[in-house]
Image (cartoon, grey):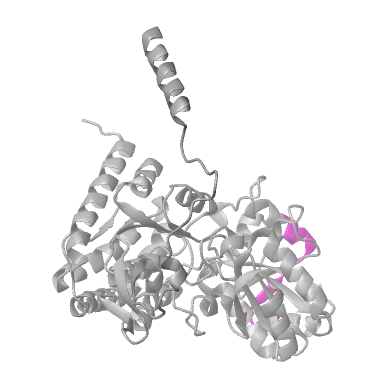
Amino acid sequence: MTHDQDLLSIQEARDLAEQAYRAQQIWAHADQQLVDRVCAAMAEAAYLASERLGRMAAEETGYGVPEHKKLKNQFASKTVWESIKDVKTVGVIRGSRESGVIEIAWPVGVIAGLIPSTNPTSTVMNKLLIAVKARNGIVVAPHPSAAKCSYAAARVMIDAAEAAGAPRGLIGCLTKISLPGTQALLSHKRVALILATGGSEMVRVAHSQGKPAYGVGPGNVPVYVDRSADLEKAARYIVGSKAFDHSVICATEQAVVADKPIAARLRQLMEAQGAYFVSPQQAEALRRILFKPNGAINPATVGKSPQYLAAMAGIRAPGKARILVAPLTRVGREEPLSREKLTTVLGWYEANGWEAGCERCIELINFGGRGHSLIIHATDEKVIMAFGLEKPVFRIGVNTLGTLGAIGLTTRLAPSLTLGPGGIGGAITGDNITVHHLYNIKRMAFETTPPPPEAFQPGSVPAGAVYGPSPQELESIVEEVVREILRA
């Protein structure tokens, strides 16, 4: 007997949502000690499996570098847990009678989590930890091309959670993947909130369900290198960041904007780090393979090495090349390489002075990365603050790597693999999504100011005021209703 995959997927989504709901009704009454014990067990199990799961992710998707995926898994388990382990998520979390307000944490309910193919195991770890810590249930929907490794990551944490005392069914993961099944999960009556990380279309679907959603838009991240920058550090960081996991993190640098006086030197230093600057003819070959006519990225090029891309494009790249750099002069639809490139290709622009660099960065951000991130390398505080004040993004990394700085590994931003682009990027927040976004707060408010006497004075009726129909009007309305009934 054959079964329709879409129907099986829909049924699985419904079953997992119901199971998570029943389990969450129990978990909502867990005390802080049990919550923390369960989450600590989940984080430890995921951390110990980081290498195996990273290798699985690279093998299943064909994206990125196994060693780098291991590091992301370690970040999503250990670093994320360390950042939230002391956060109170049960009962009174802030306030007092003396302050006038007591704040009480309250779970959201059941969360639906969309998992991308680019970070399929680390994103699972991140979302499960912050959801369970806030006393929610969660069901994740992996990307079809990463279904096995995403489920493996979820399974590790499910087993650890249940062994530590979590109710069975609190955490679920779809195994029968289809678009109708994922949509059935997102729209299910038991799902209270959607946590979406993935392509623009899936994030749009998440936002269209008529329920709260945290969505992550694309990140077309520029990196401006000012004449005041430490050029050796900037070159090492830019090349290393772009090469990290073959550029599948959405906060990875997508184009260098080099201040004119230091551009030649920066290029030399980047070349020494493994950047291969392509010729105009080679850049044209890359344009043809990286993007479809409608501007969408070719999935076959995502997360690939420079040598792999060069072979696809029919060009040659040195074996020691870590990234390919294409000098560009335009931004927009007429220049495909000015788009977000989730692979080891980096754009290169030159601008004379920070003001011109600022304008070019804004062009790039407006073309596909509104609200997301920007990196600046500089020591001139005036320039740094000018970029901070003027850029339409919510993460500005200063003298750090885009990949690891924006997610909070090399900065004090909240550690997260879900980076909100704010209202200008089509999302509800510009924060790095963490546990604080996944619980509500009840507030007990005590009177601190007596009401004014006017609040208790009886109201007066203005002379001549009439409320409701007059007796004559009421009689006319009744007669008309009777006539309508007789006619019917």
Answer with left or right where residue 49 lies relative to residue 269: left
Please name the residue shown 26% across and 51% down the image.
17
Quadrant of the frame with the N terminus: top left
Q: Is residue 79 magenta?
A: no
Residue 96 seen: yes
As drawn, 409 above or below 175: below
Answer with left or right where residue 431 lies relative to residue 225: left
How far across and how far down the image is residue 38, in percent?
A: 21, 74
How far across and how far down the image is residue 390, in percent?
A: 71, 74
Q: Which residues are magenta?
A: 271-284
How far across and how far down the image is residue 40, in percent?
A: 25, 79
Name the residue nearer the viewer: 127 or 9.
Answer: 127
Name the residue nearer the viewer: 405 or 482.
Answer: 482
Please name the residue shown 22% across and 77% down the image.
41
Name the residue nearer the viewer: 263 or 135.
Answer: 135
Answer with left or right where residue 469 lies relative to residue 140: right
Please name the residue shown 47% across and 32% down the image.
470
Name the residue nearer the viewer: 51 or 84.
Answer: 84
Q: Is residue 273 magenta?
A: yes
